[in-house]
Image (tube, rainbow, N blue to C red):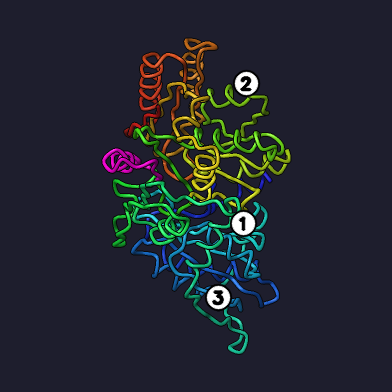
Amino acid sequence: MSGGQKARRYFGTDGIRGPVGSPVMSPDLVLRLGRAAGRVLCPDGRGKVLIGCDTRISGPVLESALEAGLASAGANVTLLGVLPTPGIAYLTRTLGARAGVVISASHNPFQDNGIKFFGPDGRKLDDATELAIEQALDEAFDTVPAEQLGRVERIRDSVGRYVEFCKSTVPYGLRLDGLRLVVDCAHGAAWEAAPAVLRELGAEVVSLGVEPDGCNINDGVGSTSPGAMAARVVETRADAGLALDGDGDRVIMADHTGAIRDGDCLLYVIARGRQERAELCGPVVGTVMSNLALEHALTGAGLEFLRSKVGDRHVLETLHEHGGIVGGESSGHILCLDRTSTGDGVISALQVLAEMRSRERSLAELCEGFTPYPQRMINVRVASREAAMADARLSEAVAETERRLGEAGRVLVRPSGTEPVIRVMVEGRNAEQVRSEVEALAGSVRACVGEGAESEPHH
């Protein structure tokens, strides 16, 4: 569907996202989006569509607009309230809905928001369906006759249903009694559900990021700022910690020493555990951003490792294509398709905690077979991602960096799918060389087309 991809004006790699009030994320656009989605997803004028959101102050405004648009097309709407993205995917499947809609900008700051859709199977919509919705956005806005308008209801126990589902993904009878865990919910969608899951499984929970006020989501907490969680682990002498992102589909953990364990580490632990129990099917799938050491560790253990493009959508496609069940990204977006249909931070953390408990080993011990190579990434802000990537000077700078690194390292320069930035990543065995090379390459990008940069060092 490359042609469909080129024709897109609104949908990116993870739905539609942007600053609230901008042309791509205004109540007017969301109203029309609801009507267009209703026409495409419920073409017979019937069917149920679920709506859930995170804790952003803009959520209720956009929820009202989306609800009105869907109902105007004849779709019945069920409001779930604040719920993690994977919880919305789960309820879409179990309640027999035509679609589920998430109002969230995930790890972005509170000023942003977004809309993404799940199909009746709890998986993200395919390219063709998203393109059809975009095309319907161009149609004149109309409303079905009054007697055909959709009805609206609200489910009051959506969090409880999701909590029970999460608990069902660990082996029967497994308990977390005796474990002290720090849980950072990023003041986001999982602020109620995540601590409840762990407490009901017997863990002693130290909560962080559970006081959402509409404007503090992801602010110095959560998976994009795991240092707060790691520090609390050391302070409270916890056995481990986990930090979720704003919509609850990503997780970063820390072991009992406070050492941060990213998605690559967690994917290694989950894959090796399933391998030892002969439960692993197909290859393990990472992305072009996955640490080279992960590939070496897994292949050294006799597992096949494949890389997809960045984005859980592409990881999922590769898993389906090759019959795999476990994959993920270093950002902490992990797929365990033998447990659920989409990335789920709580469920991913539970898989790791289950390995700790069943094998009676600490997270640090479970990660011993994987030592990440030094990797650094710098985001360079640009006016146009497309123009930046097409600049011949950028290609020349990348080639020169690769020449200097040789086989001892790896370079990746790619446009973000959600922000106006070019991501510059360098990885290798020598930390000092990695640092100097990524800074030099980011400087080359800025000299060509950049407007500034913000560093996001890894490992």
Residue 238 belongs to the span the image colors magenta: yes
Of badges 3 and 1, nearer the viewer stands 3
Q: Which mark is first along the chain, 2 or 1?
A: 1
Local secondary structure at mark 3: strand
Q: Which residues are magenta?
A: 224-242
What amino acid type should be assigned to the residue bearing mark 1? Glu
* x then y, percent, for residue 138: 57, 64
Tag nearer the camera, 1 or 2 = 2
So how many labels did they put on this image? 3
Is residue 324 something one can see in this rendering? yes
* Outermost residue to the left: 235
Is residue 241 on the magenta stretch? Answer: yes
Whether the residues at callouts 2 and 3 have beta carbons within 8 Å, the answer is no
> Mark 3: which amino acid?
Val
Which residue is denoted by mark 1 in the rendering?
130
The nearer-to-camera label among 2 and 3 is 2
